[in-house]
Image (spheres, coloured by chain):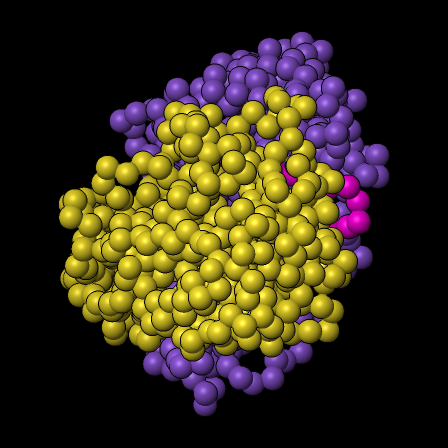
Chain colours: A purple, B yellow
Amino acid sequence: MKTRALAGAFALTSLLCSGQAPGDGQPASSNIMGAEYPRVQADNRATFQLKAPDAQKVQVQVPGARYDMTKGQDGVWSVTTAPLVPGFHYYSLIVDGVAVNDPGSHTFYGTGKDSSGIEVPEKGVDYYSYKEVPHGDVRIRHYLSKTTGKWRRCFVYTPPDYDTNAKVRYPVLYLQHGMGEDETGWIFQGRANLILDNLIAARKAVPMIIVTDNGYASRPGQVTAPSGGAPGRGANPATAAFEEVITRDLIPMIDSTFRTIADREHRAMAGLSMGGNQTCQVTMRNLDKFAYIGAFSGTMNGLSTDPLDPTTAFNGMFEDGAALNKKIKLFWIGMGTQEPNPFPGAIGAFRAMLDKAGAHYVYFESPGTAHEWLTWRRDLNDFAPRLFR
Amino acid sequence: MKTRALAGAFALTSLLCSGQAPGDGQPASSNIMGAEYPRVQADNRATFQLKAPDAQKVQVQVPGARYDMTKGQDGVWSVTTAPLVPGFHYYSLIVDGVAVNDPGSHTFYGTGKDSSGIEVPEKGVDYYSYKEVPHGDVRIRHYLSKTTGKWRRCFVYTPPDYDTNAKVRYPVLYLQHGMGEDETGWIFQGRANLILDNLIAARKAVPMIIVTDNGYASRPGQVTAPSGGAPGRGANPATAAFEEVITRDLIPMIDSTFRTIADREHRAMAGLSMGGNQTCQVTMRNLDKFAYIGAFSGTMNGLSTDPLDPTTAFNGMFEDGAALNKKIKLFWIGMGTQEPNPFPGAIGAFRAMLDKAGAHYVYFESPGTAHEWLTWRRDLNDFAPRLFR
């Protein structure tokens, strides 16, 4: 061999922070191939590392806590955190004041960017794990939206045997992400496909199609950037066209492309946080199209904790609880017990309004989890079995 | 509304570097939603920005050049590069010596990590653009490999009308990425699905299924990390089990799951760089399974530029050119005119060996491009129309 000079595109960088032997624990399953860090210890403490010999200060920001990292003689900074809550968490490394990704982690679109994320194992729990059961496909599908005038992307989960049961038609769940996330969230962070694979294999849920779309949608000429304002207050132009997109573009495209049962009794919508708010708005204004509603850590009142009078709130849309009970087959509300303000107050106010109106709903609490993906995985695992029965 | 306190998961960070009016040009199409930077100017210069008030030095590394960025009074660093070659390029920002992602860019798995990337428009060229033509789906599919003992992921492109032409069977192209990349590369960087959508719509290529898998595969107990060594020299344990995975696990799974034509005359394999090397190795050792071969910027000799004697090289596998010409329907080799060493020498040595043996092949050069994705998009656009005729 005359030369071993490696071209730029060949060079592998940052695969390992240093040559030292890895510490205790296991590399996180959310790491890129071969990355030894971050590592998760048996007690759910996480160890982070970054090689940054010239940096003045390096920190790691995990949910609810920021840790200073310590520089070793080899220029590798490291720290081990307190035990983390199981499930998926976004995190950042902070190098001289700049929040950056960890090169050892895969990225996940959330917090308004492709962010590092760490999966902390949940002992004895496997409903969102890869198991030897039949697996559905997740299809990346593009469609041209008449509403926005742009190509959009959705992900479509087709259940196991969709391809072989060529005459069977399926109900559809439209499943939405939160603020600063997109159509990828429910697959890569939420593992919705694995949750359904496992539920279907255990005959706990009926086979269904799941569609995840991007909750941001604006008409030509409108602002397209997600804003940091309150979710779904109607005035946010970044999401203003979403109802039109889902009802006029997405649902007709899905129903004409896939073997769906295209009626309200076989169509559900659910979403988390901002997506829960959007779900309430879209479904309640389109009860001819949806019979099942899931509000995960987000309800129609957004971030407001103000008391709601069913006779006046939302133009009296919830006033006649008895009529809603006849029309809506399932109204499902869930949240984590550790959610920060304003979620407990906001969701509480919304539930109190439903109670006053005599509108039925299922309420679910995820013990020990906050405004995070483990709450929403548990939500889906409770919600999906109740659909289309 | 009693409170507007936003929980951590709600906060949108880094969407815009600053409040200042965006400069000339357009946000790159590879940016996250709403990010104004990086921007591409009309003459293909690119402007990068990063808010880093406390950093001492910020640079941007684009292919072949590193630029110092200049700090403005608002703590925002910026620079405009010389014109970039059109197509897709990996890049990094370098903050106080640490290569990090640009929060304004989506990430793309390459260079051994989820890396920032910038798409520079190619004027007057639309074969890899979204157009109003029928689009196929890209399916994310998981399978349990008997060889590795682990779940693996492949992407499967099914052509337009695959679902509606329920009795039609299709040929299959197995298409592999390069070193430090994975099964996502040919879709998100290479746009293989769009290239095929457009070729099929123009009746330039026959409808086909494309499968992209992960070229890294090791048996239980072997090293799993990609190494920085020469690609495919046989001694690399990170890729040692790939031939077994594709022939014993992947192809049978694809043929039993999708409506393929499961014979060698309807099965092709191609790959770029390390994937081109793997393609040569897998196809030449399994000519009962493949009749079409594509080597994009990578051939059987890897990075070696040593002359090759067909009577001795690779155990004489290429010695009988006439026999190979009968057996192989297409041997296609391509590279960019600006590829760095050792690629011109290595690919030249391989071609010279085929010439000596009288083995036929098609040779294609991409003008003005190096070891990069625009070379490989052009390769696929020339290669795919020649398949399965």
Residue A304 shows in the view = no
Q: Taking B91 as reference, is A199 left or right? A: right
Specify start and end residues of the magenta stretch as a single range: A130-138
Seen at 67% across and 42% down, the residue is B263
Residue A185: image location, x then y, percent: 55, 44
Residue that appears at 48% across and 70% down: B302
Q: Is residue B33 left or right of residue B228?
A: left
Q: Is residue B185 magenta?
A: no
Residue furthest to the bottom in view is A73
Above or below, A116 against A206 in this view is below
x, y percent for residue B184:
51, 51
Q: Can residue B245 be seen in this view?
A: yes
Q: Which residue is at the front of the view, B206 or B30?
A: B206
Q: Main secondary structure of the magenta part?
A: loop
Q: Residue at x 77, y 53 (%)?
A: A125
Q: Where is residue B250 in the image (x, y as percent from the top left)?
A: 68, 51
- Does A359 sit above or below residue B307? above
Viewer-closest of A95 and B121:
B121
Residue at 44% of width from left, 19% of height from top? A244
- Compared with B220, A121 (above or below) is above
